[in-house]
Image (spheres, rainbow, N blue to C red):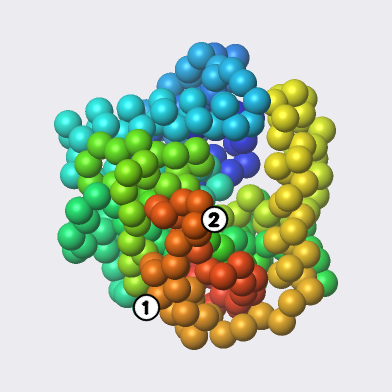
């Protein structure tokens, strides 16, 4: 579900359309004042009544709506993927298969997760993002993030918590070879421009958006560590450790681990 976010939606449609087929994508525009795009033939696009409320309440209602939509899709599908427009579920190219084949090989009892990689702009060596080039050819650094190790893939009806961050009443499992790349912090100037978006300001998003500069600061200032070693560590840790306040969310001892993303990912998203 998106509102005023064509920048990410275009890339989301292009990526998932290639991996899964345009006819299997479902996009919901938050507000009937939103214009239906004419650049994604075959995609199921619906403009809905705008969901009211401030950040927390709005996101809760949004995920209630999307959980109900997902439940209905199981009349046609064996699995459903739920993500935000700036999130891309990516199979490691070393696996040698695409997303659909990779997921089809898994025994998914309720859900599976990709390891969260929060991609940020390293302002010491990376400029503004160019829309015509893959993100990962322009951004080489990411923060291994429990926040984005989301139970995105489900095999039966569930109730997602706000932001797809958890499934109510169920644990999660991060599978080897699968990553969730989050690109919301990919460009500092775009983040700054969002502070001036009247819909987001009125919805109470200013504080939320301000947090986004933290990822940029970390990837810009910290030494990037080895991808293979530290993604394995993060996956193992997050599969075991839970915060005391939420047993069905991942934890990693509050470690901020910045890694260098390998070249093999550079042309995917």
Label 2, residues with CA under 10 Å away: few <14, some 14-19, many ≥20: some
Which residue is located at x 50 percent, y 30 percent?
60
Check the image and name the residue furthest to the front.
Answer: 244
Q: Position of residue 48 (x, y in %)?
A: 48, 17
Which comes before the other along the chain, label 1 or label 2? 1
Q: Quadrant of residue 261?
A: bottom right
* Rendered view: 223 above or below 114: below
Label 1, residues with CA under 10 Å away: few <14, some 14-19, many ≥20: few
Which residue is located at x 29 percent, y 52 percent?
111
Q: Quadrant of residue 140?
A: bottom right
Q: Position of residue 108 (x, y in %)?
A: 22, 56
Which residue is located at x 36 percent, y 32 percent?
67
For disc 1, the marked residue is 94
Q: Position of residue 168 (x, y in %)?
A: 36, 41
In front of the other: 41 or 1: 1
Secondary structure type for disc 1:
helix
For disc 2, the marked residue is 147
Which residue is located at x 73 percent, y 43 percent?
209
In front of the other: 66 or 136: 66
Left or right: 72 in relation to 204: left
Residue 23 visible? The answer is: no
């Amino acid at each position: 579900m998106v509102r005023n976010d064509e920048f990410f939606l275009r890339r989301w449609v292009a990526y998932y359309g290639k991996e899964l087929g345009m006819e299997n994508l479902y996009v919901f525009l938050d507000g009937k004042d939103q214009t239906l795009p004419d650049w994604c033939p075959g995609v199921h696009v619906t403009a809905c009544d705008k969901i009211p409320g401030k950040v927390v309440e709005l996101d809760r209602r949004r995920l209630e709506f999307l959980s109900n939509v997902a439940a209905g899709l199981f009349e046609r599908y064996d699995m459903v993927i739920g993500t935000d427009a700036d999130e891309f579920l990516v199979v490691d190219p070393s696996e040698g298969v695409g997303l659909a084949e990779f997921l089809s090989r898994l025994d998914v009892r309720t859900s599976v997760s990709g390891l969260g990689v929060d991609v940020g702009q390293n302002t010491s060596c990376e400029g503004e993002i160019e829309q015509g080039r893959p993100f990962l050819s322009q951004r080489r650094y990411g923060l291994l993030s429990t926040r984005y190790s989301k139970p995105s893939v489900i095999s039966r009806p569930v109730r997602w918590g706000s932001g797809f961050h958890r499934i109510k009443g169920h644990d999660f499992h991060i599978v080897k070879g699968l990553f969730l790349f989050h690109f919301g912090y990919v460009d500092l100037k775009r983040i700054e421009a969002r502070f001036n978006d009247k819909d987001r300001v009125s919805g109470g998003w200013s504080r939320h958006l301000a947090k986004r500069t933290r990822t940029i600061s970390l990837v810009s200032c910290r030494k990037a560590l080895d991808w293979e070693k530290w993604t394995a560590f993060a996956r193992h840790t997050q599969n075991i450790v839970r915060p005391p306040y939420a047993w069905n969310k991942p934890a990693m001892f509050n470690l901020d681990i910045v890694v260098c993303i390998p070249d093999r990912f550079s042309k995917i998203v």
